[in-house]
Amino acid sequence: MIDFVWTWAWVFLPLPLLTYFFFPRYKYEEPALQVPSLRVFNFQSKSNDKNAKPSIFRTTLLAIAWISLVIAATRPQLTGEPISLPVAGRDIMLAVDVSGSMGTEDMELNGVRSTRLSIVKEVISQFVDRRVGDRLGLILFGTRAYSQTPLTFDRKTVRALLIESPLGIAGGKTAIGDAIGLSVKRLKDRPAENRVLILLTDGVNNVGEVDPIQASRLAAKERIKIYTIGFGSESMVIPGLLFQRTVNPSAELDSETLIKIAENTGGVFQRAKSASELSSIYEELDKLEPINQDPEIFRPTKELFHIPLAFALFITTIISISHLRISKISKKVINYAQLKTTFSFSRRE
């Protein structure tokens, strides 16, 4: 179906007729100087003939060109059949700890010892790719918490910005409460049934303006479900000068607070001690049942104004070229007549 967006442009269609009937016509005046010698050749330009009538073919072409211009001005569009775009999914905010401790190399990824943050980026990127139909947002937190991406369907951007996030960009400490508070602020305007926060950290809340437990109560009031993940290995071998020693790199992980946060909001706390366990946790979270929302109707449209515009340009170009050729031919005939007359006068003398 073709629609005209600017229908008011049709008022310009009768403009040439109004100009023809209501504006004074050009009056032909006899030239002040007559050249009697040119009458021998019986040559007279049609453009100077006051009794000459305009070419019907040329007038028709001009009318078609004008109609095409008016059609282009109305901005025609080809509108397709309505397409229903069901939006099924949740609003998921991903809060990721990027503090200094996330640079600890206490686990392996694909057989290579890697930092915690590198493993988190790999696993969450796969999770983001799978969440088709969800609005995803990303919050990075350390000493401070800030929103890296708002809630969006653009999963590629969320994934790219996560991968590009450097270690310690938000500071070296851990503000879990601030991260939850910022997530609540971003999620509170979304439908209550769809609000989910997945918070990953490897430490304890040791900085920030908001207490994590109080922040979780605020999230529960807004009906936001929080899933907490404690990440980090419990043993790491440190080589020494004479012997090796084994330490627990996750000794500072505050599992009790993370459990309390999840319980307050109806979520679940899970502990990941390796890359494979973290991947399994996100696979379980990936099974969250989507909630159908009202479908969005989309009608594809295609602009067509360039077709009548190009047609009008083509017609006017043809008319201009033909008029130019006629003018050149007329000029050559006149020059030839003048030359022959001059030659004739010279012979008489």
Image (tube, rainbow, N blue to C red):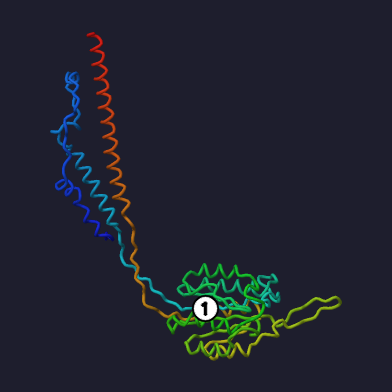
Q: Where does the C terminus fall, quadrant-wise?
A: top left
207 sits left or right of 344 in the view: right
Q: Amino acid at mark 1?
A: Met
Local crowd size for mark 1, using a 10 Å CA cut-off: few (<14), some (14–19), many (≥20): many
Give above or below for 221 relative to 88.
below
Q: Where does the N terminus fall, quadrant-wise?
A: bottom left
Residue found at x 17% / y 49%: 18
Residue 56's image quarter? top left
Q: Residue furthest front?
A: 32
> Residue 276's x, y, as percent?
63, 77
Residue found at x 28% / y 46%: 312
Q: Secondary structure at mark 1?
A: strand
> Residue 301's x, y, as percent?
33, 61
* Residue in front for this viewpoint, 13 or 307: 13
Residue found at x 61% / y 82%: 175
> Residue 50's x, y, as percent?
15, 33
262 sits left or right of 49 in the view: right
The residue tagged 1 is: 93
Total numbered labels: 1
Give above or below for 52 relative to 137.
above
* Residue in front for this viewpoint, 274 or 177: 177
> Residue 25's x, y, as percent?
16, 41
Q: Residue furthest right?
A: 242
184 sits left or right of 71 in the view: right
* Residue in front for this viewpoint, 8 or 251: 8
Residue found at x 25% / y 49%: 68
